[in-house]
Image: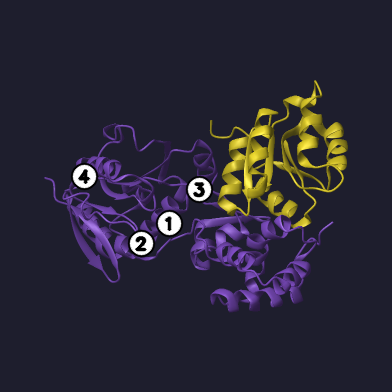
Chain colours: A yellow, B purple
Amino acid sequence: MKKVLSVDDSGVMRRIIGRTVEVLGYGFLEAANGVEALEVIARNHEEIALVILDVNMPEMNGFEVLSRLKADPVLKAIPVMMLTTEADRPRIIQAIQAGAVNYLCKPFQADDLTVKIAESLGEGF
Amino acid sequence: MMADAISATEFRLLRDLIERLCGIALGDEKTYLVETRLAPLLAENGCQDFGAFYRLVSSDPSPQLRDKIVDAMTTNETLWFRDTHPFSILRDRLLPQLAADLSQGSRFRIRIWSAASSTGQEPYSIAMTIHEFCRSNPAVRPDQFEILATDISPSALFVAKLGRYDQAAIARGLPEPLRDRYFHQEGHVWTVNDELKRMVTFRKFNLQDPMEALGRFDIVFLRYVAIYFSDGFKRQIYGGIARLLAPEGHLIISAVESLRGISEDFQQLTHGSGSYYQCQLS
């Protein structure tokens, strides 16, 4: 089963994303920070269909995780969706240019999260 | 790292705060709602748990964060049976006449268009209303009704077609007896039963495209969409729907939308506190 990885320092947010991913019929992986995320991706990259990256995390932020993934010849193919706040909006253009396929600003409505994840997975197209 | 769930104490504190801020009284069973709606605000404000978030709100004299809480708790997400009255109009006014036509053989099939179906709640709510009507009117059958559900977003259509909803989504406006009759539960996920899915055809459609290819309809639901359009585009859409409707067919829009000054092809009718429109073109 293909899986979605949520990278977020908020356990509650990871749980909400996990429920949404389950609704869409995907497996779920989680990481609480960027360093942990890179470890999880290295171990599971063949089954990861999407990474959902929170921008604001301690240690290594979402932009840095994104640039590391996109610099890796194997991992760069994994689609990445960014979770941001309104304040990060200007930097989102950079993230899309750096290879993120989608983004969603917090706070968001649950329906929007479901549709955005489906969109990032290429479902329906 | 954050706590995995809101504690009972944190829920009580936030529940009381929400009631003070916007008058919404939440029962204990609404814990998930507070958690789901406020979690993005916790993350946005760097709070480690709901207790820290409550302390932040309590110590912050500015209205911004409080406004965001009110917004998060009151903004309508897609609801089952949204606004209630469109579905009572369907049940009490439109279906009885259509059922009589079916019984007398003057119609063989009823077609309904849900023109902005999003993640599926509206077309499945229409399907449940029809099913419930047929249960008390055995002369008509659900398979005599066809619901076309369209949306511009392929991903929204994918979610709608899956017909799978989590606990929070399933609880928004869906009465438990209907949930138990028309959905089945697997873990945290509720899935629409096949009897409802069979009634609904999902299809990508852009309202800017010619509508004729969709065929004729007896009822069109077009709600919470036209509010975003220019008057010129509204005229184009409502004109197209008028030509698409069967003689004396009906259009249902939301209470925040109006045909006044936009279309003269419809007559406004009322039922209880709700309005609906009958096409005047022959």
- The residue wearing badge 3 is B119
Q: Chain of mark 3?
A: B
- Under circle 4, the secondary element is helix
Amino acid found under the numbered disc labelled 2: Phe
Q: Could you tell me how far apart the alpha carbons at marks 3 and 4 are, in whole angstroms?
A: 26 Å
**Number of marks in the image?**
4
- The residue wearing badge 2 is B87
Quadrant of res B171: bottom right
Quadrant of the frame with the N terminus of chain A: top right
The residue positioned 36% from the left and 51% from the top of the image is B227
For disc 4, the neighbor class at 10 Å (few under 14, some 14 to 19, many from 20) is many
> Could you tell me residue B200's position as x and y percent?
41, 45
> Could you tell me residue B167's position as x and y percent?
62, 59
Marks 3 and 1, the one that precedes in the sequence: 3
- The residue wearing badge 4 is B242
Marks 3 and 4, the one that precedes in the sequence: 3
Query: Tags 2 and 1 in contact by the CB under 8 Å rule?
Result: yes
> Could you tell me residue A43's position as x and y percent?
87, 33
Q: Nearer the viewer, residue B35 or A59?
A: A59
Amino acid found under the numbered disc labelled 3: Thr
- Under circle 1, the secondary element is helix
Q: Chain of mark 2?
A: B
Marks 2 and 3, the one that precedes in the sequence: 2
Q: Could you tell me how far apart the alpha carbons at marks 3 and 1 are, in whole angstroms?
A: 12 Å
Amino acid found under the numbered disc labelled 1: Ser
